Amino acid sequence: MVFDNIKNAQLYYGLGERFRTALEWMATADVSGLSNRDQVVIDGDNVYAKYFDMETKSPEGAMPEGHSNYADIQYLLDGEEAVGYALKGSEPPAKPYNPEKDIAFWDVPYSTIRLKAGDFYIVWPDDLHAPRLALGEPGKVRLLVVKVKLN
């Protein structure tokens, strides 16, 4: 997992051309015309983004998710939230892998990291994450989730 602020995005260009494409797009993205859950194609199915305008959720009962074919870059535009984080171990997922959505869910303990506007994190297939967790009472957040194809 990488956790940083968008002002440092260039530090991660060396992760590969697709990551560079994603991070450069994120740093200049104009989301003013987007609605909740709109998808933006950046480089075909290699790099694409979804825009979210929603409420954070209670950490109670949250199950970390994991992906197999894509890395996630989650970039918080407005608001504050926590993200749960755990390394994928040998425990099987509690909700099986859905290949169409490239997602599975685990019922495992996790640590949390606090995010504020401008922060982003990158997670790979060995990283489990529970996004959009409330810090106290649920609150409004706006964010981009950029998917970067790994294969």
Image (cartoon, grey):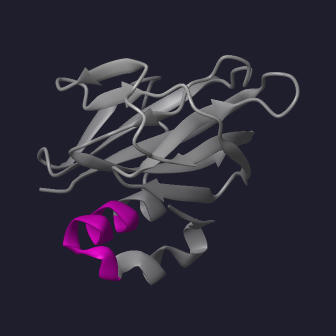
Residue drawn at x 72%, y 25% is 59
Q: Is residue 30 visible?
A: no
Farthest residue, direction right: 136
Q: Is residue 73 visible?
A: yes
Task: Report which quarter residue 66 is drawn in.
Answer: top left
Is-magenta flag for residue 22?
A: yes
Residue drawn at x 27%, y 25% is 97
Residue drawn at x 56%, y 77% is 8
Image location (x, y in percent) of residue 82: 71, 41
Task: Report the number of numbered marks.
Answer: 0
Q: Is residue 134 left or right of residue 90?
A: right
- Looking at the picture, does residue 144 appear above or below residue 26? above
Pick the front one: 41 or 1 = 1
Image location (x, y in percent) of residue 50: 37, 35
Image location (x, y in percent) of residue 75: 53, 51
Farthest residue, direction front: 90
Is-magenta flag for residue 116?
A: no
Quarter of the image where the C terminus is located: bottom left
Q: Is residue 132 left or right of residue 100?
A: right
- Looking at the picture, does residue 78 appear above or below residue 135? below
Per the rendered image, the range of residues in magenta is 14-24
Characterize the magenta stretch by its predominant secondary structure.
helix
Pick the front one: 15 or 106 = 106
Pick the front one: 5 or 101 = 101
Q: Is residue 125 left or right of residue 17?
A: right
Task: Report which quarter residue 132 is drawn in.
Answer: top right
Task: Report which quarter residue 107 is drawn in.
Answer: top right
Image location (x, y in percent) of residue 1: 50, 61
